[in-house]
Image (cartoon, grey):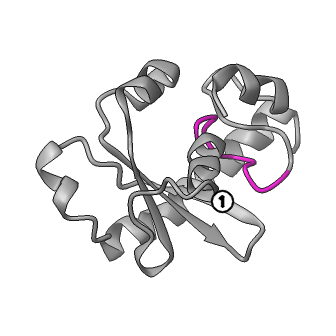
Amino acid sequence: MMRDELLRQYEVNRKGVILTPGKFAGQMLYVPHFWDRYLSGSADDTTAGFITCFITEEEKKEFPELRQAETITLIEIGRTIICELPIRSAHRESKGDLRHSQFGFLKLFRKESALAKDVSAESGAR
């Protein structure tokens, strides 16, 4: 799925965070694209439950918020939530090493908390 299709499917705030309830709520608009890529068998690594995809130049053009990132890592939590782990690599030399740090995984929960507050503020929830 590319940006136009995702924008028809999901409501997003000005930062590109998905506001629509569901498994992608609170995630960036590009996350469903990479999840779809995983489901089609195009993920580059699925070690230990982490889903890692190398980001193509076409994807960077479609999702400019990825900037210079080389990889994106997702995790499925309880079959109901898909989250991006905040350990995207901006270095080509790390492509050969897709192991994920515990520190990066723990940072996920702080990020998810911040995104949940952002989504609540955007939706007018108190």
Magenta segment range?
Answer: 22-30
Q: Residue furthest front?
A: 41
The residue sitting at 70% across, 50% down in the picture is 116
Q: Position of residue 55 (x, y in %)?
A: 38, 39
Q: In the image shown, does 87 or 38 lie closer to the viewer?
A: 38
| Mark 1 residue type | Ile
Q: In the image shown, does 30 or 20 lie closer to the viewer?
A: 30
The residue sitting at 88% across, 42% down in the picture is 125
Quick one: quadrant of the N terminus?
Answer: top right
Q: In the image shown, does 55 or 87 lie closer to the viewer?
A: 55
Looking at the picture, does residue 82 appear above or below residue 47? above
- Report whether 28 appears left or right of 117: left
Q: What residue would you read off at disc 1?
A: 82
Q: Quadrant of residue 44?
A: bottom left
Q: Position of residue 88 (x, y in %)?
A: 35, 49
Q: Quadrant of residue 10?
A: top right
- Magenta part, dominant SS: loop
* Membership of 27 in magenta stretch: yes
- Report whether 109 appears left or right of 19: left
SS class of the residue under badge 1?
Answer: strand
The residue sitting at 72% across, 77% down in the picture is 78
Looking at the picture, does residue 46 appear above or below residue 95? below
Q: Position of residue 126 (x, y in %)?
A: 87, 45
Looking at the picture, does residue 53 appear above or below residue 47? above
- Report whether 115 appears left or right of 5: left
Q: Position of residue 34 (x, y in %)?
A: 56, 46
Q: Quadrant of residue 104?
A: bottom left
What is the tally of numbered marks visible in this picture? 1
The residue sitting at 21% across, 53% down in the picture is 95
Q: In the image shown, does 21 or 39 lie closer to the viewer?
A: 39
